[in-house]
Image: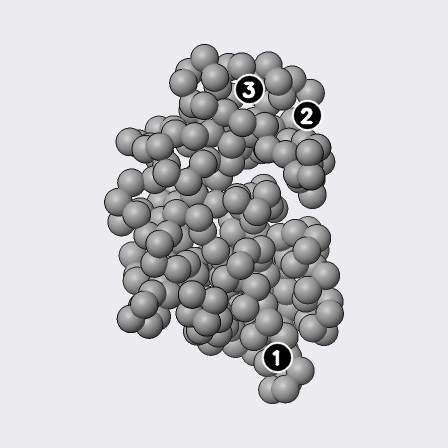
Amino acid sequence: MEELKKIAGVTAAQYVKDGMTVGLVTGSTAYYYVEEIGRRVQEEGLKEVGVTTSNRTTAQAESLGIPLKSVDEIDRIYVTVDGADEVDPEFNGIKGGGGALLMEKIVATPTKEYIWVVDESKVVKHLGAFKLPVEVVQYGAERLWRVFAEKGYKPALRKQDGQRFVTDMGNFNIDLDLVKIDNPIAFASMLDTTVGVVEHGLLNGMVNKVIVAGKDGVTVLEA
């Protein structure tokens, strides 16, 4: 599977052309995309500017010599290639398993062509088997956890090394064990209007191309 992820990442990097501003994202498959961009910068003289979605990806890009800008310095991103934790037939998806969902959405929003790279296990009929990440402010996080629990969402405050996980933006993550999300658009709307929620991992209708790595090779699906 790692070799297939690498092939998919390299395939995705082919969409990047000279002079583009591109999103450089976080995730196991996206890692290979960033690596290939770095190789092209060093070996082919590719001229592009990257906008990263996490401190981890920033460090990776800098180590590869990829020129970077802050999202505040740009008006448009031509291509962002990202990973996803789940994607359904309507190209709705869940992201944020790595904890960078807020920054990923900020970079995705001004992107002209937004592409996901996934392995075939991430392509599902219904979203929800993967726990839905919800980024919340620290103040009132436990109260918000209780609100989600009362609604039957089976929430868990994410931890790392025995401590509460803190995002790069200084927030907490609450993961919702929903099993199946019948209406991703309605559920996203509910979270959008919940006080204390900064962002959530539902991305509905934002992507127009999905590159899938599977046992039979790499397939490109288009909306």
Q: Residue furthest bottom?
A: 44
180 with respect to 154 (left or right): left
Of the two numbered discs 2 and 3 in the rendering, the one whose residue sits closer to the viewer: 3
Residue at 29% in and 71% down: 216
Structural distance between the alpha carbons of marks 2 and 1 = 39 Å
Assign the N terminus to one quadrant of the image.
bottom left
How far is mark 2 from mark 3, CA to CA? 11 Å
Residue in front for this viewpoint, 170 or 7: 7
Disc on the earlier residue, 2 or 3: 2
- The residue closer to the viewer here, 16 or 179, is 179
Left or right position of 26 against 65: left
The disc label shown at residue 185, or none:
none
Q: Which residue is mark 1?
A: 39
The secondary structure type at the circle numbered 3 is helix
Report the residue marked by disc 3. 145
Label 3 sits on what residue type? Trp
The quarter holding residue 94 reads: top left
Relative vertical location of residue 146 with respect to residue 36 in this rendering, above or below:
above
Residue depicted at x 58% and y 55%: 26
Quarter in which the C terminus is drawn? bottom left
User: Which residue is depicted at the point 52% across and 44% down?
Assistant: 97
Residue 66 is situated, as x and y percent measured from the top left of the image, at: 68, 71
> Whole-Å distance between the Cαs marked 3 and 1?
44 Å
Q: Is residue 94 left or right of residue 47?
A: left
For disc 1, the neighbor class at 10 Å (few under 14, some 14 to 19, many from 20) is some
> Nearer the N terminus, badge 3 or badge 1?
1
Which amino acid is tagged 1? Arg
Q: Which mark identifies residue 138? A: 2
Q: Position of residue 47 (x, y in %)?
A: 63, 78
Give how far across and how far down residue 143 sits, in percent.
59, 14
